[in-house]
Image (cartoon, rainbow, N blue to C red):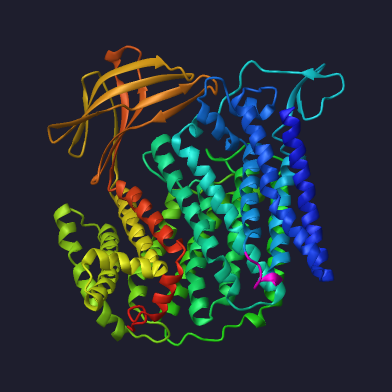
Amino acid sequence: MVANIGFGTLLITLIVALYGIAAAIYGQKSQHERWVNSARQAMALMFPLLTVPVLSLLYLLVTHQYQVAYVSEVTSRSMPFYLKLTALWGGQSGSLVFWSWLLAAFATAITLRDWGRDREFLPWVIIVILVTLLFFLSLNVFFENPFSRYWQTSTGIVQAFARPEGAVPFVPRDGQGLNPLLRHPGMIFHPPLLYLGFVSFIIPYAFAVAALVTGRTDDRWIRLTRRWTLWAWLFLSLGLILGARWAYDVLGWGGYWGWDPVEISAFMPWLTGTAFLHSVMIQEKKDMFKRWNLVLIILTFDLVVFGTFLTRSGVLSSVHAFAQSAIGPLFFVFIALTFGISLGLLLSRWKDLESKNELHSLFSREALFLLNNLLFLGIFVTTLWGILFPLISEIVTGQKVTVGPPFYERATGPLFAGLLLLMGIAPLTAWTYSSLKKWGRAVWKPLVFSMLTFPALYIAGITGWQGVLGFWLVGFVFAVTAYEFWRGAAARIKAHGENVFTAFYSLVKKNRRRYGGYIVHMGVIFMALGVIGIEMRQVETQGTIPEGGSLSLKEYSITYKDLVSFDTHDGRNVTRAVVGVTRSGEELAEIYPRRDYFYDANQPMTIPGVKSTLAGDLYVILVDWREISEAGATFKIYYNPLVNWLWIGGWVFIVGILVAAWPENELDRVQKVSSPLIKRKR
């Protein structure tokens, strides 16, 4: 009965979406406002309607309804309650329902805004959002039905929603259980946040299409969607950071990022979305880069769908990907149609989108933002080629080629370094006109401060040119960002007599967008510190040692003390080693690397033992062991310098986005307009 309700509501939602699209088109063509209003009401119904199948599926998951195929595939009786809830997005069909539900939430939310000034956008925004939602709903209704059931027939067990002729219901005694790699706290939040980032980018895309259709070539669509875009970027950034943490904690490869194709598929829309967020500021301030911004948001939207296609088509082998499915070609068709239509609209308005202003100086902030866009797109093209080349090679030659981390690191490393350098240069340049001489007068103080990194690196024993250059860039950008905060706060202290803390607080509060961006930059600096540390300074060793034996790496030493194996109440067999950690002869801690074997999924999972400090992590993996303890156990040890600055920087990064996206009250806006501190010239 619950399955029938869930599927029936999915079907009703699909019909309502079709009606909303038709009503919006007819209302626009006939100029009958009531039809557009009816379409708006249809879109407002999307979220409450899709909540019914989501709740239905959750009920089936937590009550062990194993006659429903999806429930049997992703849950088991031994799984804890919270994992049964997260199993909603643990498989193909459930994740598509979840994706549609989140998109419906944004669709309903956008209908609630005041459309008085922007009525001409409304029908086109409705059409774009509902067409996208209709596509994902049709995948569930016609191809990936999460409410399909098992039936026993004369020829065996089959899956179908309706009872085949002569069949009887089949109910397995237990389910197969969720993939062990997904049974980690990070996976409770990582996929939902990625999905939130994906679906919320549809809002600025819908307004961009509406602007092209209506011929509104000003920046109104950007201003309307600025915070939607920031929140989309926040969700996507959080999803990527938590995904990196999940990989570090669970996959046992000693790192946080392996340039896995599915990792890259989520990273690509982040790259173009980040370029878009920087680029729109130029259109708002200087009425430039109109074409750039439309190209970037179209790319971002289609990369969102492309990333979803890659994880669900079966064309990629990855720990993140779902099984091969018939829906892959449908994604390809949808991407081709949306990209083709968007590109056609853009070309039809190409002349109208000509910038009113031009670049007057190659050293102006506008020029540096353009270079910033080019670097982001360079990284995007590199990563896209890394994904597509193996597929093209297999089609053309029949041989599957693997593109590994060395390619990505060599190709993108200089581009990331260029972006980091721009973060230090751009804040100190002026709009419209600038010169090297003016920039030199602004930069000399932070540049001198950044030189302190060289003796610090020498003392630390870091002499390789790549490491020295990387750490100096981090120091330089940190000095510039801190200098910008201090310069603004000092002006407030002088003008208002505020203390240092009040001055910093007021500075950020009264110009959230600018200083929120600087906080984001500070987060990037800390993250870069972690990335450079682990990528350039990581060391490892591996060895088999008997009980009581030791293995050394740098100044650390591990001692194998004990090994136990036991079953848990949630269907695991845990083999856990007890390892003592010493540094330079001083005992620091005990850590517990282990191997978990999940009986329901018939699959192991490696959990490292980690001793963490701000200086770095000692990361120990239990590779193998013998039943007789004297025979010893094999451990792999990594030392990951500065890796925890990656996680610290991630949280600073998120705080910065929240500051920039937080709405300003009316008093703040009035004070910002009248404040001489904000209007100061360089």
Q: Main secondary structure of the magenta part?
A: loop
Q: Return the x and y of residue 19 as percentages of the image width and height.
A: 80, 54
Q: Is residue 473 left or right of residue 108?
A: left
Q: Residue at x 47, y 75 (%)?
A: 370
Residue 314 in view in this figure: no
Q: Which residues are magenta?
A: 114-120
Task: Say above or below: 41 vs 317.
Answer: below
Specify the quadrant that holds the C terminus. bottom left
Residue 115 within the segment the image draws in magenta:
yes
Q: Is residue 88 left or right of residue 497?
A: right
**Which is more toward the observer, 384 or 660?**
660
Task: Say above or below: 134 vs 2.
Answer: below
Residue 484 within the segment the image draws in magenta:
no
Q: Residue at x 32, y 54 (%)?
A: 532
Report the residue that reaches farthest toward the left.
Answer: 585
Task: Say above or below: 382 vs 3.
Answer: below
Q: Residue at x 82, y 16 (%)?
A: 154
Specify the quadrant that holds the N terminus. top right
